[in-house]
Amino acid sequence: MSEVLKPDLCVIGAGSGGLSVAAAAAQLGVAVVLIEKHKMGGDCLNYGCVPSKALLAAGKRAHIMRHTKSFGVTPTSPVINPAAVRDHVRGVIAAIEPNDSVERFTGLGVHVIQAAARFMDKRTMVAGDYEIRPRRFVIATGSSPAIPPIPGIDQTPFFTNETIFENARRMEHLVIIGGGPIGLEMAQAHMRLGSRVTVLEALKSFAKDDPELAEPVLRKLREEGIVIREGVRVERLEEIDEGVRAVVSDGGETGVVDGSHMLLATGRKPNVEGLDLEAAGIRFDQHGIKVGKNLKTSNRRSWAIGDVIGGPQFTHIANYHAGIVIRQALFRLPVKAKHDMIPWVTFTDPELAHVGLIEDEARKKHGKINVLRWPYAENDRAQTERATEGFVKVVTTKRGRILGATITGEHAGELIQMWALAIAVGLKIKAMTSFISPYPTLSEINKRAAYTYYLPSLTNPLVRRAIKMLAKLG
Ligand code: NAD
């Protein structure tokens, strides 16, 4: 006989979204059951953001060692120990793991069940030895790598983001299928750690970003030696003696790309399998669980948050969704998710960061707009760091309302924060010039970009005449 639990909230999935809901609810004294069938921390901690940034950090150290000459420091060729790099990545995960652990959540008062969950009916879920009948459900089961139906894929060994961070061997030549953020971050990390890397992208790399800012990042990746082929169709995959082979067609010509290893980074699929969503009357399709603006599913007792609802798939979005659900579930506030102010960063070097509308979207939505730009090369701190490549691009309405910002360059992911705040609270461009920015910092680039909004008025003959008249007053 299973034990029946009747908590306020039953959260399915202990990734970023589920953990945020469970922690907040438990800390506010609400009874929570949290069900996780695999690793606490989910994709972000174990296979995503954390290990990928740790690997990129290792690659960056190797890159810096090779490129110190311009600072007057003799460069050196680093010796890369793949097993030690793997241990570094594991160590970073281990350092963060306690925050997401069963022990921590149990300590907060959450009842953690480590088992697969499935719906029995609209009100009941089963997991392990338990039957759970909560007041509300929160489905936060995330996403998994989508495996494309390429002929031969079943017989070909490949990594995904769920397996590549466990690799402890040197990869002679890594072939990456997919030129999105996962593919390109992994391309640079592995290139810098001593592998040859080829990226095969069916359409366009960084397709979701502003092409004007994506282009310099792709150029830099190519300069570092990564082969990025766009508009390439992978016809077939096979295992060969030396590793793997991709048979590709490119502009009507067929050829082969042989590699020692292969990584698939071709997008994500929602984790809905095994949940028996039909039993709960929860509608979904291949993109994910269908939700309204308040993140409610077609079952009025249930919300779904994070990657499992499709749309933009980022840890910070899952956290944002968690806040929306908490306010509804606990305080009965009628809040809705707004997806027009989402920032994202690809952590290549240079980084590519974005928030709000890109130029094309802004033109379509608002007609006449202002486009402001400021280059890193005009910033003194960028000069001292010899990080002069990159620029900030901001789009505003004609009256100065900030619509979007994209940055490529060193620490772009930090510089974008100011624009994310500005857009979230509806600031106008004037606000971005109305503070003192400490010198010399990269963030001054943001302020200088904002000042360019006023350039046309500075060259306005009327303004110039007014200044001359005022000067005559003594
Ligand atoms: P993606 O959908 O962003 O990119 C996948 C790419 O693979 C696309 O460009 C697509 O055209 C290509 N592709 C698909 N099938 C292909 C095929 N058969 N042959 C060749 N190319 C093919 O997916 P991703 O890079 O796997 O990332 C998954 C999700 O995780 C995204 O939502 C992404 O935004 C997110 N993510 C974010 C970050 C970050 O914020 N730094 C990092 C990694 C991933």
Image (cartoon, rainbow, N blue to C red):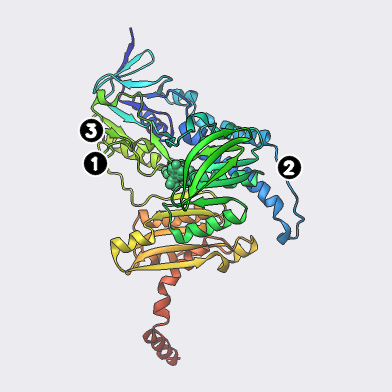
**Which label is found at residue 79?**
2
Q: Secondary structure at mark 2?
A: loop
Q: Amino acid at mark 1?
A: Pro
Task: Locate residue 432: give its quadrant.
Answer: bottom left
Task: Locate residue 427: give its quadrant.
Answer: bottom left
How many C-alpha atoms fall within 10 Å of the one at disc 1: few (<14), some, or many (≥20)?
Answer: few
Point out residue 329 in the picture as x, y percentages from the top left corner: 28, 33
Q: Secondary structure at mark 1?
A: loop
Ligand 1, seen in the image, is in the quarter at top left
Q: Secondary structure at mark 3?
A: loop
Q: Earlier in the sequence, mark 3 or mark 1?
A: 3
Q: Which residue is mark 1?
A: 334
Nearer to me, 126 or 421: 126
Nearer to me, 153 or 349: 153
Q: Which residue is mark 3?
A: 298
Q: Amino acid at mark 2?
A: Val
Q: Amino acid at mark 3?
A: Ser
Rounded to the nearest angstrom, the CA distance separating label 3 from label 1 is: 17 Å
Rounded to the nearest angstrom, the CA distance separating label 1 from label 2 is: 56 Å
> Which quadrant, please, contains the N terminus?
top left
Vertical relation: 76 (above or below) 457: above
At a point 45% along the width and 26% down the height, the residue shown is: 105
Vertical relation: 456 (above or below) 19: below
Q: Of all residues shown, which one is farthest toward the right? A: 74
| For residue 67, side relative to residue 392 (left or right) | right
How many numbered markers are drawn? 3
